């Protein structure tokens, strides 16, 4: 009987330490879910609005404003020379908007991008801004 009690207690302790790990497919969730919303807002600025849904609060955040100049792209020509122009140079106005769901203890439970545009180095500026690759 004592062995069963000890085993059950050990199992309960092990399970109490388990948390849901966000998928690796979403770098923003992987970076922020489980952390304090205070850390997020201190790093990226305050939310623009919030609303209560049960015991959760959903914050709408907007930021990451940046203007970048994207150079023209050219096809590769013969002998390594620059070929025909594929796209012209342009100016891009980058920004991100996200909805951040927190629990009653101000821990981020979900973060979802609402407005995102292609970034400088990939398909998501929000991912580049909110979850930069660690080098």
Image: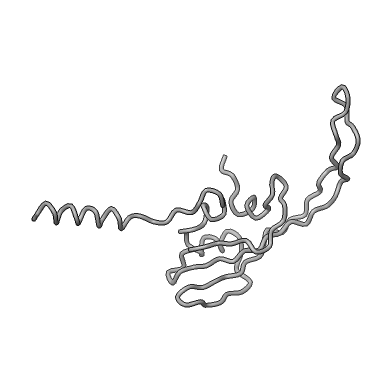
Which of the 4 image quarters holds residue 95?
Answer: bottom right
Is 107 placed above or below 13 here?
below
Is 87 placed above or below 64 here?
above
Is 107 placed above or below 50 here?
above
Task: Please tell me which residue is depicted at 44% across the width and 72% down the height of the picture.
Answer: 104
The outermost residue toward the right is 84
The outermost residue toward the top is 79
Task: Please tell me which residue is depicted at 59% across the width and 44% down the height of the picture.
Answer: 133
Q: Quadrant of the N terminus?
A: bottom left
In percent of width and height, residue 16 lies at 30, 58
Question: How many numbered markers are drawn?
Answer: 0
In percent of width and height, residue 117 lies at 72, 56
Give the colour scheme of this rendering: one colour
Q: Would residue 29 be found to the left or right of residue 19 on screen?
A: right
In percent of width and height, residue 60 lies at 61, 69
Q: Would residue 14 be found to the left or right of residue 30 on screen?
A: left
Which of the 4 image quarters holds residue 105?
Answer: bottom left
Q: Quadrant of the C terminus?
A: top right
Task: Please tell me which residue is depicted at 65% across the width and 64% down the height of the picture.
Answer: 114
In percent of width and height, residue 27 lies at 56, 50
Task: Please tell me which residue is depicted at 50% across the width and 51% down the height of the picture.
Answer: 23
């Amino acid at each position: 009987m004592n062995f069963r009690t000890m085993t059950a207690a050990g199992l309960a302790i092990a399970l109490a330490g388990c948390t849901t790990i966000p998928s690796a497919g979403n770098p923003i969730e992987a970076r922020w879910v489980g952390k304090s919303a205070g850390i997020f807002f201190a790093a990226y600025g305050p939310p623009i609005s919030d609303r209560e849904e049960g015991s959760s609060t959903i914050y709408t955040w907007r930021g990451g404003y940046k203007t970048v100049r994207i150079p023209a792209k050219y096809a590769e020509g013969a002998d390594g020379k620059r070929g025909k122009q594929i796209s012209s140079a342009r100016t891009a106005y980058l920004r991100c908007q996200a909805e951040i769901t927190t629990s009653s203890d101000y821990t981020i439970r979900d973060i979802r991008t609402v407005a995102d545009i292609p970034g400088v180095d990939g398909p998501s500026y929000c991912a580049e801004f909110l979850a930069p690759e660690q080098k």
